[in-house]
Image: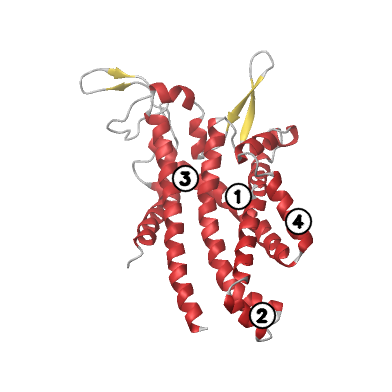
Amino acid sequence: MKNWKLWISSLFLLLLVFIMFAGPYLPFVDRNLEQTGVVKTEEGKFILPPIPPREGFPLGTDKYGVDILSQIILGAKETLAIVVSVVIIRYILAIPLAIGAFYSRLLEKLLHGWQQLFSFMPPIFFVSFFVTLPFIFFSENRGPWMITVIAILETGRVADVILQHMKETKRRPYIEAGIAAGGSPFSLFQKYYLPVVIPTIIILIINDMGRVLFLIAQLGVVHIYVTHKFVTLEGGSYEVVNTSLAWPTMFRTITTDIFTYQWIPFSVIGAIAITIFSLNLFADGLQKFFENKYRTYRADL
């Protein structure tokens, strides 16, 4: 049977990569994100921003008259860069921790405590708490700080999943056969565990990219952005202004737009939903591919 999930999701992800790198140079994309004022229709009527979807603005504009399609295309690269950065840091920490916990009872207890500490509430609550601490909120390096916080908070969960998979693998008959044949812990890990663990990690990484994208979308709804600046207002007060083009920043007015200018939030929700769906479909396709390959590999041993 053909692995249609892998093929279809691969096409979607290739399209996403194309948009990330070639999108800004497409002729219909406004790279300067210029604000559009009044638009005159063929009937002689005038439309003020936000402009609903129409000719010249396939997804409409925001309240400043900036083309939403251009914002989505230009923000794709930054959005995925944030997601990939979080996932890379998370797995750089999680993989050694999981392997260490597999061979060390002390590290296993540490991992279990880490997992328990950050698993009793949704991640958005912990992220919201830590990134609003003064030394992060007012830091000039807020972006790296926030990426690191998001990565660390679910490192325990990822490491625990990898650890449990290694424990499950340990109970399989071919591991016992390797031990009986006199294999050392290193050779067993290299020849028996790695072929099983690596595909699992790859699938986890793909799924985690969708989880991270969903999390930063939630943060955008509550006005927590990866980068921002402070603008001084009259009277000495200041305002926090977003400086990012990432998709979740387009949710900053979602509470009002959802009732009046639905095309604004729905356009961003559509881009995020399609990306998450493609990642999940790709992970399912990869899992099927690795299962078929793994069965073949075990038969050859």
**How much space separates mark 4 and mark 2, taking CA atoms?**
26 Å
Which comes sooner in the sequence, label 2 or label 3? 3
Residue 249 sits above or below residue 46 on the image: below
**What's the amino acid at mark 1?**
Val
Please give the residue where the numbered disc 3 appears in the rendered image: 76
Describe the element under mark 1 as helix, strand or loop.
helix
Could you tell me which residue is drawn at 61 percent across and 55 percent down? Answer: 88
**What's the amino acid at mark 2?**
Ser
Please give the residue where the numbered disc 4 appears in the rendered image: 109
Describe the element under mark 3 as helix, strand or loop.
helix
Which comes sooner in the sequence, label 3 or label 4? 3
Query: Which x, y percent locates residue 152?
Result: 67, 48
In which quarter of the view is residue 242 placed? top right
**What's the amino acid at mark 3?**
Ala
**How much space separates mark 3 and mark 1, taking CA atoms?**
16 Å
Q: Looking at the image, is mark 2 or mark 3 nearer the viewer? A: 2
Q: Are marks 4 and 2 in contact (CB under 8 Å)?
A: no
Residue sitting at the far bottom: 181
Q: Nearer the viewer, residue 112 or 132?
A: 112
Residue 131 sits above or below residue 102 on the image: above
Could you tell me which residue is drawn at 45 percent across and 53 percent down? Answer: 280
Q: Kindly identify which numbered label has been placed on residue 187.
A: 2
